[in-house]
Amino acid sequence: MSQLKFEAVKVGDTLPPLEPAAITRTTLALFAGASGDHNQIHIDTDYARKAGAVDVFAHGMLSMAYLGRLLTQWVDQHQLREFGVRFTGITHLGHRITCTGKVVEKFEADGEQRVKVEIQTTNQYGETKIVGDAVIAF
Amino acid sequence: MIDKKHIGMKLPVYKATAETGQLRFFAKSIGETNPIYIDESAARDAGHPGLPLPPTFLFSLEFQIPSNAWRDELGIVTSRILHGEETFKYHRMAYAGDTLQFETRIADIYDKKNGALSFVVRESRVTNQRGEHIADLRSVLVHKNA
């Protein structure tokens, strides 16, 4: 799939962004079933309110899965060496998130040419919800 | 507060297999459009033996561990937890049908905000049915104590 060459990648390059559909209750119900995370805080409004939340909200791992798509639409998954994030904010119903990535370093490790990419999700109000990085081998 | 005496605790070794149908459902739920994650013949045409587990799916497999006894032992209350961090280090691809073994330990426990928050760090080593090292997972769970 990926014909991208290490030489062609430059520090400062940005990845083609990924813009999934706005988060709905259906999104969360499907992801709960598919991911096996049945925590009621993501699917049951009554439970969420009792737990002190305004409403159900998105699984952090849903947004991380979107970031995974951002990476695998850029390079083949077998090139992925590391992928880590910090969940810094809650993604709520109605949020339209944009996944973005930027090359911040090119280096060699374990006999491979690698690049480090900074990644994040941001909603339509410009609020960053997840930050992290990934290491990709070429 | 979560007691630090649990640092080093090992969870029971856990084996799990991702089924093709489950991976296809997961792909749908995240809006995946790349056919190698949806269509077995497209995956094989791309050189894969079956549908690959997408980058975060190992977390889902681990999440389906049948016993939550370790959470009870640590005193974790589900309604009080948030996911703080998640990191994967990959060594090999994993595919539908692989039997994946998770060896998990509680790597660290620490507090912040004068004990209002506890952080539980879990580390898992994942190997396949051939004993090959697939990945390492590191999860940080935030527990609201107050």
Image (spheres, grey):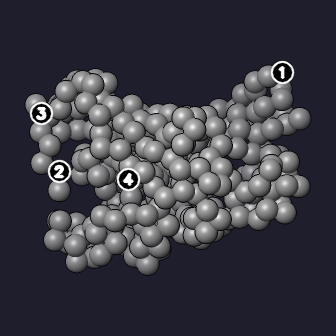
Mark-to-mark CA distance, 4 and 1: 38 Å
Please indicate whether residue B58 sits to the left or right of residue A109 in the image.
Answer: right
Badge 1 sits on which subunit? B
**Residue tagged by mark 4?**
A69
Badge 4 sits on which subunit? A
Residue that appears at 54% across and 56% down: A22
Residue that appears at 34% across and 65% down: B33
Mark-to-mark CA distance, 1 and 2: 49 Å
Please indicate whether residue A73 sits to the left or right of residue A19 in the image.
Answer: left
Task: Say yes or no: labels 1 and 2 on the same chain.
Answer: no
**Residue tagged by mark 3?**
A8
Occupied quadrant, residue B18:
bottom left
Q: Which residue is outermost to the front? A: A125
Task: Say yes or no: labels 4 and 2 on the same chain.
Answer: yes
Residue A88's place in the image compared with B96, above or below, is above
x, y (%) of residue A42? Answer: 69, 59
Give, as a three-letter code, the residue at label 2. Ser
Callout 1: helix, strand or loop?
loop
Query: Which of pointers 4 and 3 lies earlier in the amino acid sequence?
Result: 3
**Residue tagged by mark 1?**
B114
Query: Which of pointers 3 and 2 lies earlier in the amino acid sequence?
Result: 2
User: In front of the other: label 1 or label 3?
Assistant: 3
Give, as a three-letter code, the residue at label 3. Ala
